[in-house]
Amino acid sequence: MSPQFQRPKGTHDVLPSEQPAWQLVTSTLAEVAELYAYGRIQTPNFEDTEVFARTSGAGSDVVQKEMYTFFDGGSRSLTLKPEGTASIARAYIEHGMQQLPQPVKLYTVAPMYRYEAPQKGRYREHWQVSVEAFGSEDHALDVEVIDLYRQVLDRLGIKRYELEVNSIGDRMCRPLYLLKLQQWLDANPDVRFHPEVMRKQTTSLLRIFDTKDLELLGALQDAPRIGDHLCEPCREHFANVRELLDLVGIRYKVNPTLVRGLDYYTRTVFEFLNPEEKAQPQICSGGRYDYLVEQLGGPPTPGVGFGAGVERLLIALEAEGEIPEPPTIDVFFAFDDPSKRKVVLPYLSRLRSAGVSCDAEYAGRSLRGQRDYAFKRGAKMLLVTYSDRAELERKIEENELVDQVLREINEALK
């Protein structure tokens, strides 16, 4: 019989059996971020639509096709967060964080919402960690956020990943490059009149490289590359990033066609990839965004950061065979005589208050059924209460408090 209601398309339930891996990933992300001196921030799940429309770019897929936008009771246009960086930048401006010692280093773990075709590891509601550093153009900060995510992968035991990096220039060099790119397209009408290229030419030309169309990517192989047209400051910045990546011992590959799908990126861009996943290999994407705060009405403020999907990281974790075991309980209380439960339950509460995980029989099982259930749960101790006594029938580890409770239960049953 099918349930009357099911979860909305493109969403998923994180069941208790999945929580150990989920908690491992999210806690590791948080622990490593704080190890690198990033402070946690939580922003609303929805923002003024302009926060995303202004920063992501009118021609981006996010703005054109993927945003969940609605009007509230006051006729205000609001949008569920499609990504975390713009929201954190808005908070940085609103709360005057530019007055704090710079850089201001922040992170969040939160749900994001995009209306797109659901696939493995790609949900309409998905969880993402966003790590952001505002207020410094130091190339070492670019490397720090890359190293932060590398540290997450190392701690989780994920060894099969690739890092790609590129530089997409800034306001000084990008306009001249885009002019050369347009001239190349004009000379190659078979590429220029590709539907995707035609659409992106009118909004953000650099995004023609941000495509999943393999045939189009092949046709763009001969197009001029942004890396060959960087101004001297951008060239020096990228050279310093690569030098420091080498010094830190981070393996990477320069991908000259790597760009980002959002308008606010400048200079360094990077992606961590899971080579086992062909359709959706990205597990972390980020880079520098030196104009983002300014686009939101704040003062010129450099920034760098990344967004990393929790679900995709879980896929990489599973591929490594590193999924943790489900949690066990310390003590299971079984009853041969159900009437004695009222004698025992206060001790159950006492043990829980002391940090000992406990459970008890509530389903009317036979004593044999209770034993089987306790063993399936992985209980370290099985305490059985009979009409006149209590016994520990299974004891994998010592616990003085449990021994004391056993003695007291036996006294109470006399």
Image (spheres, rainbow, N blue to C red):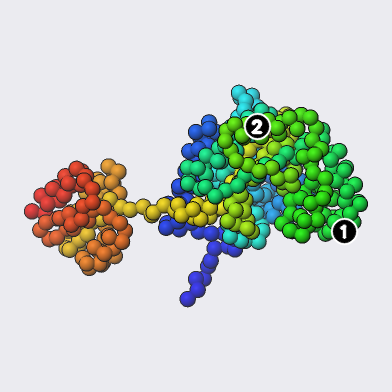
* Disc marking residue 92: none
Q: Residue at x 71, y 41 (%)?
A: 166
Outermost bottom residue = 1
In this orientation, which residue lies closer to the viewer: 139 or 199?
139
Asked if residue 123 is positioned above or below residue 150 in the image, the reply reads below
Q: Are marks 2 and 1 in contact (CB under 8 Å)?
A: no
* Disc marking residue 190: 1
Asked if residue 388 is positioned above or below residue 39 in the image, the reply reads below
- The amino acid type, in three-letter code, at marker 1 is Asp
Outermost left residue = 414
In this orientation, which residue lies closer to the viewer: 134 or 75?
134
Q: Residue at x 74, y 58 (%)?
A: 214
Q: Is residue 378 visible?
A: yes
Give whichever of discs 2 and 1 has the lower sequence position: 1
Q: Quadrant of residue 85?
A: top right
Q: Residue at x 13, y 48 (%)?
A: 407
Q: Compute the Cα span from label 2 to label 1.
A: 39 Å
* Disc marking residue 243: 2
- The amino acid type, in three-letter code, at marker 2 is Glu
In this orientation, which residue lies closer to the viewer: 252 or 24?
252
* 172 sits to left or right of 24: right
Judged from the image, the secondary structure of the residue bearing numbered disc 2 is: helix
Asked if residue 209 is positioned above or below residue 371 in the image, the reply reads above
